[in-house]
Amino acid sequence: MLRLAYRKLGANVSGVGEIRPLLHAQNSGFHSGQTSFAPRSFFGVEDFLDDDNSRPYTYQKEKKSKNTNKHISFKQRTVAFMEPFTLDVFISKRFVSASITHRVTCKQVAVAGTNSKDIKAALKSRSDIPACLSVGRILSDRAREADVYTASYTPRERDKFEGKIRAVVQSLIDNGIDIKVYLD
């Protein structure tokens, strides 16, 4: 009964009891006339590999440097260890958050934001200048508890160092955290 159904669907049924589908993949020379049953992947992307023949074309290729012998300066190699803590400030229309992160281990040492329960109740607005000042004050307290007294700050490309961002950084400086600001 099963063989009959497969014959109607177009499968090749041999007499030995094996049922083979009629999907043929030619792996020998051009017009040899012979077909073989090559294993195929589910998506059929094994023919489209990248330059290194390591991954299918669907993965994003790594960007290769134009200059492979590019020299990395001593400062580029050691800045993560000389200034290990970075300040990250995020300001949206609804809230303000700031954190101090260790560069080498990528762990957040101190975090403060106007979304947290302890700050939320004490503020009228979660995104104005007084909220930024309170976030800086609380972040400096938490950083001092974690024995962090210096950090570096580089604003994002879209951020200008003025207004609310400057208020957070100035509040950190006023409360005893030495912030080194890098403006490009």
Image: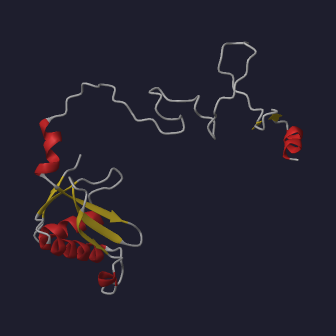
The residue drawn where x is 78% and y is 34% is 16
| Residue 133 image point, x, y percent | 23, 74
Compare residues 66 and 62 and report the one nearer the observer: 62
Q: Quadrant of residue 70?
A: top left
The residue drawn where x is 10% and y is 65% is 149
Residue 163 seen in the figure = no
The quarter of the picture where the C terminus appears is top left
The image shows residue 70, relative to residue 105, as above or below, that is above
Compare residues 131 and 62 and report the one nearer the observer: 62
Task: Describe residue 176's horizontal placement relative to residue 139 as left or right.
Answer: left
| Residue 114 image point, x, y percent | 33, 76
| Residue 83 image point, x, y percent | 13, 53
Compare residues 148 and 131 and report the one nearer the observer: 148
| Residue 109 image point, x, y percent | 21, 66
Residue 82 seen in the figure = yes
Task: Describe residue 105's horizontal placement relative to residue 177 as left or right.
Answer: right
